[in-house]
Image: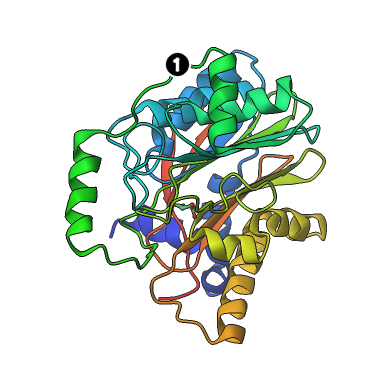
Amino acid sequence: MKRIDFLKILGGSTVLSAVLPGALRAGSMKHRNALTKPVSIATWRFGLETTAEAMKVLSAGGSALDATEAGVKLCEADPNERSVGLGGRPDRDGHVTLDSCCMDHLGNIGSVAAVENVVHVSSLARAVMEKTPHVMLVGEGARQFAQEMGFPLQDLMVPDSKQEWEKWREKSNYRPIVNIENHDTIGQLSLDQEGRLAGICTTSGMAFKMRGRVGDSPIIGAGLYVDGAIGAATATGHGEEVIRVVGSYRVVSEMERGFSPQEACERAVRKIHEFFERRNAGIEDTQIGFIAMDTEGKVGAFALRPGFQYAMARSGQAPELIDVGALLA
Ligand code: ASP
């Protein structure tokens, strides 16, 4: 492991950073939290591309919401991403259904769930926010609204997803497992030059889910939350567990109580773990990760188990991919 990667992992965990010599600790955290605005962060490796795209909008003085939307749309349009937008894995009956939500610094919210045939569900969620008196549209109604708004409708299944689904159907073992390999929701948060925060979460959800299953990603408070006066958070991983603790809202409310974005993410992950223990439920097939940012542009991230990464693009710096610390080994 390269030294810088080692430091990045340590930088993601206060538990571990407590044993680091002060100079090293200060060095790595300074790098992570050098408070240059604007900034955009996003879950997983594809965030490198989406945060870079967002940075183009932010650097030109664009809003956090416009920047975030421009970023996640790249991922939604990529047929090779198996868990977002076009090419997302279908449900167990072979329908690709997408979920998304958005929130801005003023508390404007929009969401769509279980939508078929629309690639850019992030934009559709935004349209719900901006063009309707409602906050959430689902299923056929959401698709109808998309059509009315001029969104192109298309088949979202790509040959590789179809092949995977057909292979899965040979056994049709319905056991939703969320591990590193089969989930990759994109949650992206941006802070613009004027200090406005916004976020978007977009996904095809759990692979081969039950028809009609909706996870955390389009649920405001679970998959995403933004409080323009405090901070923002978004989640990836096992949606049912994130919903159980109202994950993203929990992270932001921990920040409101005075915890740093890093500490807030750690506290939310610990709470999820606590709920598993309380229910005596098996945790081995579960992964959850949070990323968070405050109004100054300080960031944090934490996961249940190792393997989670997020990308960050900061003004004047090359986008970087950061390994996230984890509660479980
Ligand atoms: N959070 C998503 C869901 O439960 C899954 C994921 O992150 O891949 O639908």
Tell me what residue is drawn at x 41 percent, y 39 percent: 84
Residue 147 makes an appearance in the image: yes
Tell me what residue is drawn at x 37 percent, y 55 percent: 5
Q: Is residue 222 left or right of residue 76?
A: right
Three-letter residue code for mark 1: Pro
Occupied quadrant, residue 286? bottom left
Residue 22 x %, y %? 58, 65
Tell me what residue is drawn at x 64 percent, y 66 percent: 244
Residue 17 x %, y %? 54, 68
175 or 68, which lies in front?
A: 175
Respond yes or no on whether mark 1 lies under 8 Å from ligand 1.
no
Occupied quadrant, residue 58? top right
Residue 326 x %, y %? 47, 67
158 or 231, which lies in front?
A: 158
For the N terminus, which image quadrant? Answer: bottom left
Q: In this view, does 234 lie to the left or right of 317?
A: right
Residue 104 x %, y %? 72, 32
Q: In this view, does 52 lie to the left or right of 271?
A: left
Occupied quadrant, residue 145? top right
Question: Residue 167, relative to residue 327: is it above or below?
Answer: above
Residue 317 makes an appearance in the image: no
Q: Is mark 1 on a helix, strand or loop?
A: loop
